[in-house]
Amino acid sequence: METVEMNSVSLKRPRSEDDVATADEIKRQKILEKSKAENDSGQSIETVTERPEDTKSEIIPNEESEEQEEEELEDSDEDGDPESFADMMKHGLTESDVGITKFVSSHKGFSGILKERYSDFVVHEIGKDGRVSHLDDFSVPVDDEDPSEETFTVLSDEDKQRLEELQLFKNKETSVAIEVIEDTKEKRTIIHQAVKSLFPGLETKTEDRDGKKYIIAYHAAGKKALANPRKHSWPKSRGSYCHFVLYKENKDTMDAINVLSKFLRVKPNIFSYMGTKDKRAITVQEIAVLRITAQRLAHLNKCLMNFKLGNFSYKNHPLKLGELQGNHFTVVLRNITGTDEQIEQAMHSLREIGFINYYGMQRFGTTAVPTYQIGRAILQNNWNEVMDLILKPRPGAEKGYLVKCREEWAKTKDPAAALKKLPVKRCVEGQLLRGLLKYGMKNIISAFGIIPRNNRLMYIHSYQSYVWNNMVSKRIEEYGLRAVPGDLILKGATAVHIEEGDVDNYTIHDVVMPLPGFDVIYPKHKIGEAYKEMLVADNLDINNMRHKIRDYSLSGAYRKIIIRPQNVNWEVVAYDDPKIPLFTTDLDKLEGKPLPVLPTDGKFRALKMEFSLPPSTYATMAIREVLKMDTSIKNQTQLNTTWLR
């Protein structure tokens, strides 16, 4: 399942020349931040808020070496960008390039601004029990065994720095001595608790030195202690996992977990979650962490920006990817141009009919080398092309150091020389170049294998999505919005064909289409043949989707072709100030912030819409159906739109 970090899309009205000039300057300064692939757990994509994916440099999280330097580079401006953003995005994809061509509604489209502010897009996770996650309680479960509040303040910043360096083996010291200024048993106890709580893996003892009392911190059990919090320090009566609701603004899930792990001084892999949520939004989701107290987590609320943690509880189980039932979206489309009648028609259609369940644009990348092309080369076993597609120069928006790296590669085909041009080595390009250095140019398969598995599988799943989008467009063009003999429906987990005599028992909402693989069947009508023809054109055999490398064998899956959102509600509101929020968030409610008083006849109109979607569906495809607009960055920039505000 791959959700890749991406930047926001604005579906906007045309701008004035002055607006465009300002927008271009903003774009040049903020072009394409890092992205990363979400963990994959089968064929479906975890649906989160959708943004077009930047697959040119998928950041692989949690590599600590070079981390600070690379973060600074990621945040820096482009190296001399001669093209405007709109010019560079001419090389990107449009919806029709990836098979997104049909609509199911009959209303006339209109324009609106999506994600003008990240707070215009709010996502609440729907858990496996069907409840929507909300942050509405900051209280900490009462537990006599929890350390006192003084635990978090008793150590000086200098002590914490020395202890962290000891914990992370960053110096040659084998212990750290902390003098007890006010020598009482209570004071020593608090220092012991503070060291053990804040620096997992360290143990303490008390020593007398020159008539003074010192707490001596030392390693209990090597480097493994960092990833495995000490079992003996956790009460047996308490569940091993602290579950909490994470409210975050303008951060993606893995970034948030990396920040939390740094402040808690633990490894990120002790956190678990049911799905990743995107960056340019406000998102609310459940997280579980192994053997970290609610008290310690709650303390982070005092020192972290753009995060809030609450609704704490202790349980005996972690969370698993794919366990969620879906996501509930609250979306504001600003400065809409549609009439009240158009809006009513669009929203009624969304509620009653739904939208085509296309894979959204972020699945395929934003540059001249779409991810599905790399996936196709992998499936073709054409490893030279895989290497070339990832490393060759490409037109479009790129970080300056990536441009230099690609130019060096094109000139020398020397992985060492190209790697020297790449200060950020956690990206796919850096991983592949490292692999080529290690295994040589004649062993591209092993070199490519250095890239984390989820990132590698992203490419072949992108190809599956590309095929699926194209086939669904053909299916709707050929047979419309009704079930026909030869279509597929699911009975349990098994797909069966609709027979002539049963066709009246099903609607378009029952019909599924396969992602190509060795463990699926295909429709028994023209579209079944169209699958084969498309794969033959790509030099692939639909009857042999097993790859000689097991990771790249595709079993396939089934996906509904029409999704009808649940809990659909909407209202049109007027406003004058484009910066004011148009609804209250969970945090606003907790802090008692009132909703701004809106004018009855403002300069602008906004459509506030709410709906729930199951996993593996894209909110932007629902919004596309309402607006009848191409959601690709390429199309929006050509309309003189501003994105990434």
Image: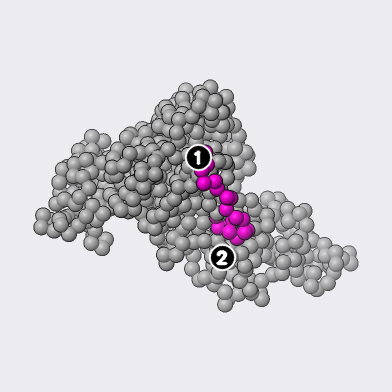
Above or below residue 500? Residue 536 is above
Q: Position of residue 634 (x, y in %)?
A: 42, 31
* Residue 502 shows up from this direction: yes
| Badge 2 or badge 1: first in the primary sequence | 2
Residue situated in front as seen by the camera: 630 or 27: 630
> Image point 28% across, 49% down: which residue?
561
Residue situated in front as seen by the camera: 636 or 409: 636
Q: Position of residue 69 (x, y in %)?
A: 63, 39
Name the residue type under label 2.
Answer: Asn
Q: Mark 2 points at which residue?
A: 311
Label 1 Cα crowd, 10 Å radius (few <14 / some 14-19 / many 20+): some
Residue situated in front as seen by the camera: 40 or 572: 572
Question: Magenta region, mostly helix, strand or loop?
Answer: loop
Q: Mark 1 points at which residue?
A: 604
Q: Residue 265 carries which label?
A: none
Q: From the viewer's perspective, is 586 left or right of 340?
A: right
> Image point 20% across, 38% down: which residue?
533
- Region rendered in magenta: 585-604
Does residue 597 show up magenta in the picture?
A: yes
Above or below residue 287? Residue 35 is above
Name the residue type under label 1.
Answer: Phe
Above or below residue 280? Residue 21 is above
Q: Where is residue 7 in the image (x, y as percent from the top left)?
A: 49, 40
> Nearer the viewer's eye, disc 2 or disc 1?
1
Q: From the viewer's perspective, is 370 left or right of 207?
A: left
